[in-house]
Amino acid sequence: MDIAHFLRNTPVWVWVLLAFLLRRGFAALYDREMTIGRLFFLPVLFLVWGAYGVITETTLAGAGLSVMAAGLLAGTALGYRLWRSQPPLRNSDNPGMIIRAGTPLTLGLIVITFCMKFILTSAIYLQPELRSSASFCMLFGGVTGLVDGVFWGGTLRLFIPWYSRR
């Protein structure tokens, strides 16, 4: 199977999701006003998408979810460190709103996360026996947890100091 054929057979919703995520990533390049709840949108989205993928795409979901939890912890520590140089959240003049500084980190992580999920899921469809391979299920869970954890770490790095100042 050639790459063009493979990409044409990828479900449309995958490309819609990519467009949505890229739009969010490009918006993240600039300072933006948001509610504090929206700050957690991408970490929660990737957590749900990741856990759903581990549960539905692999037959050893327990092993995958266990390694996903470990990856989530490691990724959170990594994300917390990556975001250390980012400007803190600021209160907006609009009640209930904050201002998040723009950063290319979010766009880069969105692209990396999408590509990793796409590659892992594509590998299962190209080689269905991977679905029941213990090592692949753990790899799937670990990578999924790691990349989502980076989003959680970055979000917490911004949220915790802001929340402490309230």
Image (spheres, helix red, strand yellow):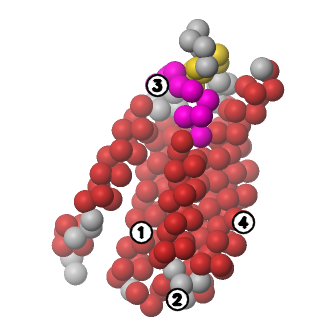
Q: Say which of 30 and 92 sits in front.
A: 92
User: Taking 55 as reference, is 161 left or right?
Assistant: right
Query: Would residue 107 appear left or right of 7 to someone viewing this image?
Result: right
Q: Is residue 17 visible in this depiction of the protein?
A: yes
Report the amino acid beneath label 3.
Answer: Tyr
> Which residue type carries mark 4?
Ala
Which label was assigned to residue 119? 1
Which mark is nearer the camera, 2 or 1? Answer: 2
Q: Mark 3 points at which residue?
A: 30
Please determine whether, in this image, residue 53 is positioned above or below residue 89.
below
Residue at x 72% of width, y 65% of height:
70
Q: How far apart are marks 4 and 2 (CA)?
A: 20 Å
| Residue 39 location (% of width, % of height) | 58, 35
10 Å crowding of disc 1: few (<14), some (14-19), many (20+): few
**Are dots 1 and 3 in contact, CB under 8 Å?**
no
Q: Is mark 4 on a helix, strand or loop?
A: helix
- Which residue position holds label 2? 132
Q: Determine which of the numbered discs, if any, sits on residue 70 in the image.
A: 4
Q: Earlier in the sequence, mark 1 or mark 3?
A: 3
Q: How far apart are marks 3 and 2 (CA)?
A: 43 Å
State the image coordinates of residue 14 (x, y, percent, origin top left): 32, 59
The residue furthest front is 95
